[in-house]
Image (cartoon, rainbow, N blue to C red):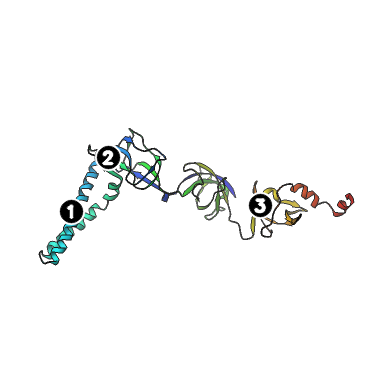
Amino acid sequence: MATIPAQAELAPGARTIIPARHAGTVARVLVSDGDAVTPGQPLLALSSADWSATLAAATGRAARLDALSRQAARSEALLAAGVIARREDEATRAELSALRSESRADAPALQSATVTADGGLVLRATVAGTVLRRHVSAGSAFQAGDVLVEIASGDGLVAEGQAPARLAGQLAPGMRASTPDGAVGEVTGVGGAIDPMTRSLPVMANLPAGAAVPGALVELGISRRAEAGVARVPATAVIAVAGQSSVFVRRGEGLEVVPVQVHFRDSQRAWISGLAPKSEVVSRGVLALKAVAETPADDIAGEG
């Protein structure tokens, strides 16, 4: 139906973003784009007083939580032995529950960064994968919420493109999306409104792993899925013979003209029906074959 420009990116589920939790500056960069990393591997050395203080408090809560968990286990044993009253055990458990609730948000922060002996920070990888992009460099300042590093933790791809406004109402999820290299994916979403500035519709598609490099521009071919009995052949194979769209098919050592119905064609391919399964279609020299096919039999006999 159309070929549209699109940009390939990793699917959201295949990309892990590590953000800044507080403002600060980058002291050193410890990895390069494309490096393979493992969970816990240092990525950046940072300086942030607020972030360091937050991590110190979270580390303290984690230590208290560990100690209180052990205390609650002892309390349960002492209660069973009749050494302490139930209210003492309940008080310990209430304190443990409150600390667990307070510490619930600490895990992601403790997983992604640690405080060094000099009060600095080390940002660490939270998953195994490949460094897709560093958004900062040594000396860079950052704000809370800024993306510092992206890690590719999978290989699924999505493509985001813009389709001409004339295709409004014709494109739909489930249609075939392909690249010039032959990778085939599927349209997953089509915008419902035309952008008044570009006169285009946003189109989203999934692509198989390896179809493109994340961040690369690709030409995305959008087409309807073929119905049963529809075959794709080179566009040069389809020609009008006696006013009927036809193809030449090999039959033993000869050729046969087969009338077909053309559902769609572009400059390279045609989608047709009317062929028997596994037919071998001729795509070269069809103009000469057409001339022979349209020559009256008497003329051919006379020439003989």
Q: Secondary structure at mark 3?
A: strand
Q: Quadrant of residue 84?
A: bottom left
Q: Quadrant of residue 256?
A: bottom right
- Which residue position holds label 2? 121
Closer to the eye: label 1 or 3 = 1
Q: Residue at x 76, y 52 (%)?
A: 241
Q: Amino acid at mark 1?
A: Ala
- Left/right placement of residue 138 relative to residue 119 reads right
Q: Residue at x 60, y 57 (%)?
A: 226
**Crowding at mark 2 (Cα within 10 Å: few <14, some 14-19, many 20+):** many
Q: Residue furthest top?
A: 139
Circles 1 and 3: CB distance less than 8 Å? no
- Which residue position holds label 3? 233
x then y, percent, for residue 40? 32, 45
Q: Amino acid at mark 3?
A: Val
Residue toward you, 72 or 25: 72
Residue toward you, 49 or 125: 125
Q: Looking at the image, is mark 2 or mark 3 earlier in the sequence?
A: 2
- Left/right placement of residue 139 relative to residue 84 reads right
- Which residue position holds label 1? 67
Q: Secondary structure at mark 2?
A: strand
One can see residue 269 in this view: yes
Q: Residue at x 20, y 48 (%)?
A: 60
x then y, percent, for residue 303? 88, 49
Q: CA distance from mark 2 to mark 3?
A: 61 Å
**Crowding at mark 3 (Cα within 10 Å: few <14, some 14-19, many 20+):** some
